C-alpha cells in the first residue's frame, strides 16, 4: 500500500505549552458554565495546549443527548478568550465546517463515525477546499486501515497539509477491558507508511473508564505518538456523555505529571 501525503510538521501549527502535548476538555459542551469552568481549571494547570469539546455529538442510538449544537461555538469562543487556549471541535458535515471556521475554531477533527463514510469525509473535504486550517482525523470505528488512510487522503487532497491522525481504538466483538481495542499494530502501520504524519492518541475512547487511562497514555507515548487527547469534565459523575471515562482537570494534571517521555534508542 502506498501513502503519499503532503504534510506539514506539527510544530508549524501546534506549539505545545508543555510536554507531552495534551488536548483536553469535556466530551460534550453541556452548558456555558460547565465549559467555562472546565476550561478555566484546565488552563490553570499550565499543561494543556488545546481545549476540546463536542457540540455535534454522533450518538450510536437515537434518544440520547446529541450535542448542544451551534450555540456551543459561542461558548467555545468565550472559553478561548478567557483562557487563551486554541479550541478544537468535531465536524461531521460541510455545514459544521463552515460554522466552525466562521466562529474561529483553530483546529477541526473528524470523528470515528464519520471516518467510516467516504461520502461524509468527502463532504467535509469539499468544505475545506481553499481553507488553511489544521484537521485531525480519528481512525474509523472498525479496524480498517484503508478507511483511515482514505479519509486522510481526501482531506489532504482538498489542500489541508496541517494534518494529524488520532488513534482512538477500534470496536471489537470480543469481550475486553477496553471500550475500543487499541490494536496498536494498525497505528504503527500507519506511522510506518507515512512517518511524517503526526499521530495523537485518544486514551479516553480506548479505555471507556478512568482507571485504564494512565496505562494507555503511557503506552501511546512509548509508541512515540506525539500527543494525547483526553476528555476532562469539571464533574465527571454528572457528565451528559461518556461519564465513566472523563477525568477532573486535577486528576488529569496528576496523570500528566506521572507520564514519561522516553527518548528513542539512538
Ligand atoms: C469524542 O471525541 O467525543 C467522540 C465522539 O469520539 P469518537 O469519534 O472517537 O467516538
Ligand atoms: Mn466522548
Image (cartoon, grey):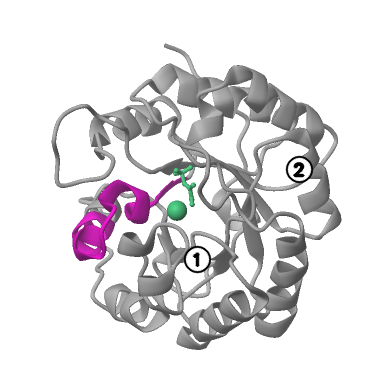
Which mark, residue 204? none
Nearest to N terminus: mark 2 or mark 1:
1
Q: Which residue is mark 1?
A: 26
Q: Is residue 58 magenta?
A: no
Q: Looking at the image, which residue is at 71% across and 32% down?
A: 124
Q: To which quarter of the image does residue 127 belong?
A: top right
Q: What span is colored magenta in the figure?
A: 199-218
- Counting from the top left corner in percent of width and height, residue 236 is at 38, 72
Q: Which residue is mark 2?
A: 97
Q: Looking at the image, which residue is at 30% across and 32% down?
A: 171
Q: Nearer the viewer, residue 167 or 92?
A: 92
- Whether residue 262 is visible: no
Q: Tell whether circle 1 marks a residue whose Cβ is less than 8 angstroms from ligand 2.
A: no
Q: To which quarter of the image does residue 58 belong?
A: top right
Q: To which quarter of the image does residue 160 belong?
A: top right
Q: SS for tag 2?
A: helix
Dot 2 alpha-carbon crowd within 10 angstroms: few under 14, some 14 to 19, many 20 or more: many
Q: SS for tag 1?
A: loop
Q: Quadrant of the N terminus?
A: top left
- Whether residue 141 is visible: yes
Dot 1 alpha-carbon crowd within 10 angstroms: few under 14, some 14 to 19, many 20 or more: many
Q: Is residue 213 magenta?
A: yes
Q: Looking at the image, which residue is at 52% across and 68% down?
A: 16
- Counting from the top left corner in percent of width and height, residue 183 is at 24, 34
**How many marks are shown on the rendered structure?**
2
Q: Are marks 2 and 1 in contact (CB under 8 Å)?
A: no
Amino acid at each position: 500500500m502506498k501513502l503519499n501525503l503532503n504534510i506539514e510538521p506539527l510544530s508549524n501549527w501546534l506549539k505545545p505549552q508543555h510536554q507531552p502535548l495534551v488536548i483536553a476538555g469535556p466530551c460534550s459542551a453541556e452548558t456555558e458554565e460547565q465549559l467555562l469552568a472546565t476550561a478555566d481549571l484546565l488552563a490553570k494547570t499550565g499543561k494543556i495546549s488545546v481545549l476540546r469539546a463536542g457540540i455535534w455529538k454522533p450518538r450510536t442510538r437515537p434518544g440520547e443527548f446529541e450535542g448542544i449544537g451551534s450555540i456551543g461555538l459561542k461558548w467555545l469562543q468565550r472559553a478561548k478568550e478567557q483562557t487563551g487556549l486554541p479550541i478544537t471541535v468535531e465536524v461531521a458535515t460541510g455545514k459544521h465546517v463552515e460554522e466552525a471556521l466562521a466562529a474561529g475554531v483553530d483546529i477541526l477533527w473528524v470523528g470515528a463515525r464519520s471516518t467510516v463514510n467516504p461520502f461524509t469525509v468527502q463532504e467535509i473535504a469539499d468544505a475545506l477546499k481553499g481553507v488553511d486550517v489544521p484537521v485531525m482525523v480519528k481512525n474509523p470505528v472498525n479496524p480498517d486501515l484503508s478507511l483511515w488512510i482514505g479519509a486522510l487522503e481526501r482531506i489532504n487532497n482538498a489542500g489541508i497539509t496541517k494534518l494529524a491522525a488520532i488513534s482512538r481504538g477500534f470496536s471489537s466483538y470480543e469481550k475486553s477491558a477496553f471500550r475500543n481495542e487499541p490494536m496498536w499494530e494498525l497505528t504503527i502501520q500507519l506511522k510506518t507508511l507515512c512517518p511524517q504524519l503526526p499521530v495523537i492518541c485518544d486514551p479516553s475512547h480506548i479505555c471507556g473508564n478512568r482507571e485504564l487511562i494512565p496505562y494507555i497514555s503511557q503506552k501511546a507515548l512509548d509508541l512515540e505518538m506525539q500527543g494525547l487527547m483526553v476528555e476532562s469534565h469539571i464533574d465527571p459523575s454528572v457528565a451528559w456523555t461518556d461519564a465513566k471515562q472523563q477525568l477532573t482537570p486535577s486528576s488529569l494534571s496528576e496523570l500528566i505529571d506521572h507520564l514519561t517521555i522516553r527518548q528513542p534508542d539512538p
